[in-house]
Image: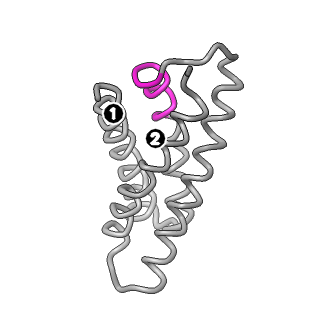
Amino acid sequence: MLQLIKFVVVGVIAAIVDVGVLVILKELLYVDVLFSSAISFGVSVTVNYILSMTFVFKRKDQSRLKEFVVFVSLSIGGLCLNQLVLWFGVSFTSIHYLIVKFLAMVIVPIYNFITRKIFLEEK
């Protein structure tokens, strides 16, 4: 249970970074929403990696480079899921992109927790 709480706290921090970068790129710099979302997701994945592997998951005995590659690979799946939800929500509904983004931020963490637990945590 403590691990799940830590995962949620780290996820909230990463989500704030994700949305913050998204809004800055989209609203202040007028970058396309899907491109902005991909960049913000990448920044948040880096923050999430550092915090998750420091505070949430018990590391396997492997190089940090390999660990990061696995983490990023899993996160690419999360990015695809994130982009799919955002694309669908923005393209086929009249829902504001931030509301759709928050929906994606409910779905993607479930995927993230399960895959990171399976592939990154020591058994």
The residue shown at (64%, 13%) is 61
Residue 55 magenta-highlighted: yes
Task: Give the residue displayed 55% in from the left and 46% down from the top.
Answer: 42
The local secondary structure at tag 1 comes to helix
Above-or-below relation of 54 to 84: above
Quarter containing the C terminus: top right
Residue 45 vertical position relative to residue 120 in the rendered view, above or below: below
Q: Name the amino acid type tagged 2.
A: Phe
Which colour assignment does the render follow?
one colour
Kindly report the secondary structure that dominates the magenta region of the rendered protein. Answer: helix
Q: Are marks 2 and 1 in contact (CB under 8 Å)?
A: yes
x, y percent for residue 76: 62, 50
The local crowd at label 2, few if under 14, some if 14 to 19, many if 20 or more residues have their Cα within 10 Å, is some
| Residues packed near mark 1 inside 10 Å, few (<14), some (14 to 19) or many (20 plus) | few
In this rendering, the answer to whether 9 lies above or below 87 is: above
Highlighted magenta segment, given as a residue range: 47-57
Which residue is identified by label 2? 113
Instruction: Please tell me whether mark 2 sits on a helix, a strand or a loop.
Output: helix
- For residue 99, which quarter of the picture? bottom left
Looking at the image, the residue that sits furthest to the front is: 123
| 89 or 17, nearer to the observer | 89
Could you tell me residue 32's position as x and y percent?
52, 69
Mark 1 belongs to which amino acid? Leu
Residue toward you, 52 or 95:
52
Q: Residue at position x 45%, y 58% from top? A: 25
Residue at 66%, 34% (x, y): give it.
70
The CA span between labels 2 and 1 is 9 Å
The circle drawn on residue 4 is: 1
Magenta highlight on residue 42: no
Residue 13, quarter of picture: top left
